[in-house]
Image (cartoon, helix red, strand yellow):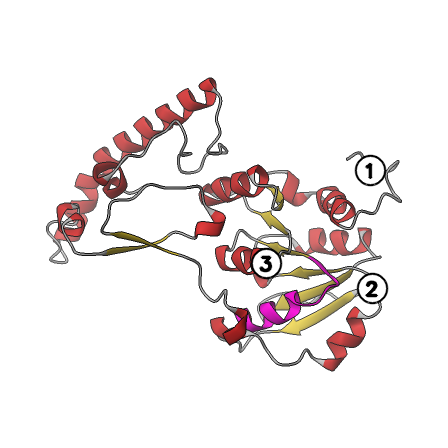
Amino acid sequence: LPQIFKKSFEFNPSYFPSFASDFSNVMSYGERCKNFFTYVSDTMIDWLSRYEIQYLFNDYGYHDIYNYDIILDNAMTLIQYPHGVAFPLSTPPNFVLLNALAVDEEYTRMVDVDSKLQKFMSKYENVVIVSRNIFYHLNISIIKEIVNDNSKYGFIFLRDKLNTTITSENIFTYDITNFTLSEEFKLLHTLLTENKILTVITYGNINEISISLHHSKPVVTIGNGAIHHNINSYIKTNMLGFSFGDSEMFSSLSYKKAFRILSEDDSDEDEISI
């Protein structure tokens, strides 16, 4: 986390989880101690590395990149900090927290859904949206296993030409190769207005999570990167869906459990331990 936060206002490790941790804003005494030492370690690493980084920037004419007083003394500082997918953070008066982009469906929603897609959705009681970033982080064989193990659900794949094509009766592939970011948001807004949409599987994308929550849809977030630990913790703490990291995200059984719970389907309750 940038030193600007630690210098400008209270960053209390008692209730604000450190970067890349699995803690929430509600921690036990032991977790608070671990969180505090994580902050200390982060600060030490920052101080040890800043001189080397400054040395590199000197060659490009940037001689004072760590002068945070310049930012703190400005009339206003804008920070991307989605309110719906992050723990509460106290800020000084000149800091403005920006929410995620494109969450207003009145201006971004498409008029109609593709007729072929409508026909596909009519076959299933529940439909799962799989965002395109999933295809860059999950092996194709795992995605195939997830689809095959959940044949009673329809899957809408938002993909581009870089993704490997997967074909199955319960898959509808929506090619968004030439979509701009705004158009991709429009499509997601449109799809999420459909009652049959069960959930969205995303690789911790803040905008996709925010739009899903805007439409009161639970999310299934995956990811084992540093920032994903914080996102997964928030999703779990606030019961906004399911979050899978490390080994869980590579097991089709994790998704099968999540779909059964979200759809309130107990037909396989003996087969799956929930």
Residue at far top of view: 30
| In this rendering, position of residue 159 left or right of residue 120 | left
In the displayed structure image, the side of residue 31 where residue 167 appears, left or right: right
Residue located at (48% from left, 73% from top): 182
Between 41 and 167, the one lying in front of the other is 41
Q: Position of residue 272 (x, y in %)?
A: 82, 37
Which is more N-terminal, label 2 or label 3?
A: 2
What is the CA distance from the residue labelled 3 to the residue labelled 2? Answer: 20 Å
Counting residues from the start of the chain, the first of labels 3 and 1 encountered is: 3
Read off the magenta span: 185-198
Q: Does dot 3 land on a helix, a strand or a loop?
A: helix
Please tell me whether residue 146 is drawn above or below residue 181 in the rendered image: above
Which residue does the numbered mark 1 point to in the structure image? Answer: 272
Quadrant in the picture for residue 134: bottom right
Q: CA distance from mark 3 to mark 1?
A: 27 Å
Discs 3/2, front: 3
Q: Residue at the spot x=78%, y=59% of the render? A: 126
Whether 200 is drawn above or below 35: the answer is below
Residue 98 position in % (x across, y down)? 37, 57
Q: Amino acid at mark 2?
A: Tyr
Quadrant including the N terminus: top left
Give the residue at mark 2: 124
Q: Earlier in the sequence, mark 1 or mark 2?
A: 2
Asked whether the beta carbons under mark 3 and mark 1 sit within 8 Å of each other, the answer is no
Mark 1 or mark 2, whichever is nearer to me:
2
Where does label 3 land, which residue?
A: 212
**Residue type at mark 3?**
Ser
